[in-house]
Amino acid sequence: MLRTVLTATALLCIAQTASAQELTAEQRSACMGDFEKYCKTVTPGGGRIIACLAKQSDKLTPACKKVLAAAEKK
């Protein structure tokens, strides 16, 4: 439970600090299935996809969580 909360918090931070950020090739590759499943209707740009993925953080695949968490550390 604590890990889920921490992951969600980290992903929300990414969404807030990367509002103009586009997904990198690595993030797109790792998160494409999650995007298709949870965020397909989101219009790209302005960090909206990252924000959408952050809202679904407890449902994301481990690979997607990993690349998004790594992006936060940069």
Image (spheres, rainbow, N blue to C red):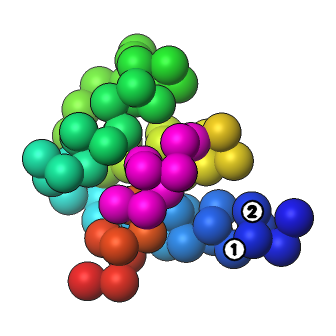
Determine the residue positioned at 23% across, 39% down.
Answer: 29
Instruction: Give the labeled residue for mark 1.
Output: 6
Q: Is residue 71 above or below residue 50?
A: below
Region rendered in magenta: 60-67
Q: Residue furthest front?
A: 63
Q: Is residue 28 above or below residue 3?
A: above
Q: x and y percent of residue 71 in the render?
A: 30, 70
Please state, as top left, top right, bottom left or bottom right, where the C terminus lies in the image. bottom left
Q: Secondary structure at mark 2?
A: helix
Q: Quadrant of residue 35?
A: top left
Residue 55 visible in image? no
Q: Which secondary structure dominates the residues rendered in magenta?
A: helix
Type of amino acid at the residue the image marks with label 2:
Thr
Type of amino acid at the residue the image marks with label 1:
Leu
Q: Residues within 10 Å of mark 1 (few under 14, many from 20)?
A: few
Q: Secondary structure at mark 1?
A: helix
Determine the residue positioned at 43% across, 62% down.
Answer: 66
Q: Residues within 10 Å of mark 2 (few under 14, many from 20)?
A: few
Determine the residue positioned at 54% across, 63% down.
Answer: 12
Q: x and y percent of residue 1 in the render?
A: 87, 64
Instruction: Give the labeled residue for mark 2.
Output: 4
Residues tagged 1 and 2 counted as in contact (Cβ below 8 A): yes
Residue 31 among magenta residues: no
